[in-house]
Each structure stands twice: as C-alpha cells, then as structure tokens.
Amino acid sequence: MGDGVVGEWRQLINVAYRLLGSLAEAEDAVQEAYARWYALPPSRRDEIASPGAWLTTVTGRICLDVLGSARARRERYVGAWLPDPLPGRAGRPHGTSGDPADQLVLDESVTMAFLVVLETMTPAERVAFVLHDVFRYPFAEVAGVLDRTPAACKQLAASARRRVRTGAPAPAGGQAETVRRVKEAWEAKDIAALVDLLDPAAVMTADGGGLAGAALHPVEGGPHIARYMAGIAEKAPGLELLERPVNGTPGLVARRAGTVLTVAAFDLAADGRVARIWVIRNPEKLRVWAGDGAPSPR
C-alpha cells in the first residue's frame, strides 16, 4: 500500500469489525477492498476524488454481502455464535503492530453487549446504523453502500436504534469490582456467593464452535449459572483466572499452562449484579490472545 490510501486501513478495520463481529472476516473484507482499489487502472484511481470514501463504500458493500450469507453459516455453527473477543493492548500505542486487533479503537461500540445487539439487526439496518450512528457518515454516503435512498437509510438506522434501546441493558458502574468478586467466588467454588453476584434472570451464553467444550444452549437463571460455574471449577484443575479487559470492559481470561482457553465478557444490570455472561471458547476466536491476555504475534 504505497500511496495515500494506506492511512485508511485502521479506519476500515474499525468499520468492518463492528459490521461483522469477526476480526478475521473484517481483515478479509478490508484486504478485498484494497485489492479492488489496486485492480483499478491508474487513470480511474486518479479520477476518484476521495479514495477513503471509495474504500469505505466498497468495504461496506463487501461486509453487507458477508452479513447476507452469515445467517446460513450461523445455522450450521455448533452452538451459539458470539463475536470475536478483543484483548487490551497491554499498554502499546495504536499502530505499533500490523495485527488488526491492535488497530481497533476500544469504545462503547465494541463492547460485547453492544455487538450482541448488533447481531439482532438485519444486514441493512446494521450497515446503516454503524456507518451513520457510530462513524457519523452522512446518509448520502450510506445510501451509496446500501444502494437505497438516503431517506430509506435513515429509516433503517432509526429501526436499528430502537433495537439498541430495547436490547441493551442499563449501564452500571463498578464492573471491575463485580468481576473481581465473581473471580474470587468462582475460584472458591462458592455457589452462594456467585448467586448473590448474579441477577436472578441472568443468562450465560457460551461459544465453543464445536471445537471446545461449551454449553450448546444458554444457561438461564442465577442459581443455574452458579452451579454450572462451580461444576466447571471442579472439573478444571490447574486453570488460572486473570482479570483482563475484554472489548474494552472488565472481563476474565482463563488459561492453563500459559494458553488462553476461555475469555468471558460481562454486562451488569442496573443494580450492579451480573445480567449477562458471554463465554468464548472457540480457539479460532482466541488467536489474538496470548497467555497473559495481550495480543499475540502473528
């Protein structure tokens, strides 16, 4: 990428990850967009006033195609499908590596809770909402991605916004302290303490992808989740739990012999108890996690 478009890479990765929830698919989409750019004759590239806008439009269309085929692929997926969990940067500044995970801005639009709500949207709603509400692209540009009128794109974003309002639990502070207490209770196999920390209507969803052991269906109810967690602790001697940021919010990483086996993200109810737990065990989704929870080299 020897010309001015190289500077668009990070922005496009950020857009594509929020559109797809998959780091590998986001990277593939951006690489395909760049491949199409360089496949243009030089004279055609010279005619394009804003290469960044062109690349965003093409990346958005590629992501739209991927989202359109995702439903069929998810139906074949073993168990629940969850977005890829993102590690923290271990203090490294942006852009110090070529790893896509290191290019991502960790804000409220990449929390696991937010990404899970995005999964409930239609592909067109998701594209309109992410491009306009998250990245502030005008509806005239969104229309070029979706091949619809700006007015239609505005309606799609409004519909998506309603899903966010109804699907996202109320924010609650103190998540780091709650996660720490969950860790301590889990390590102690203290079912009563876990029940106290969990909302009675809490839901735990696990993603093993058929490649790692995981509950195929969500575990519902605080007491059921507490017993499930205690049972895992009994069966997993030598497992080490670490407090680590997951998609920018406090979470837990479980590793054995330096290898990350599980990443857990949490969302709290308004009263500060845990309302949702997302457990990612599919090793293909944990490749960017090293033994200490920092991004691993490629």
Image: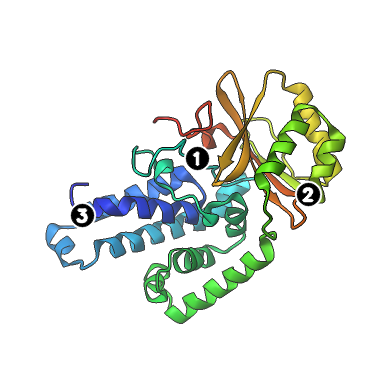
- Give residue 287's position: percent from left, percent from top: 49, 33
- Which is more toward the observer, 248 or 63? 248
Q: Are marks 2 and 1 in contact (CB under 8 Å)?
A: no
Looking at the image, which residue is at 69% across and 34% down? 214
Give the amino acid at mark 3. Gly
- Give residue 188's position: percent from left, percent from top: 79, 27
Quarter-wise, where is residue 55 in the image? bottom left
Mark 2 neighbour class, 10 Å CA radius: few under 14, some 14 to 19, many 20 or more: many
Give the amino acid at mark 1. Gly
Q: Are marks 3 and 1 in contact (CB under 8 Å)?
A: no
Q: Furthest residue to the bottom?
A: 151
**Rendered view: 186 above or below 170:** above
Label for residue 104?
Answer: none
Task: Please name which of the two marks, 2 or 1, marks the residue nearer to the observer.
Answer: 1
- Which is more toward the observer, 246 or 25? 246
The residue that label 1 is drawn on is 88
Give the amino acid at mark 2. Ala
- Give residue 284's position: percent from left, percent from top: 52, 34
Quarter-wise, where is residue 165 in the image? bottom right
Q: Secondary structure at mark 3?
A: helix
Quarter-wise, where is residue 98 in the image? top left
The residue that label 2 is drawn on is 202
Q: Is residue 281 visible?
A: no
Q: Secondary structure at mark 1?
A: loop
Q: Earlier in the sequence, mark 3 or mark 2?
A: 3
Looking at the image, which residue is at 37% across and 44% down? 94
Q: Is residue 15 visible?
A: yes
Label for residue 4?
Answer: 3
Q: Earlier in the sequence, mark 3 or mark 1?
A: 3
Cα–Cα span, label 3 and label 2: 48 Å
Looking at the image, which residue is at 40% across and 30% down? 297
- Which is more toward the observer, 126 or 169? 169
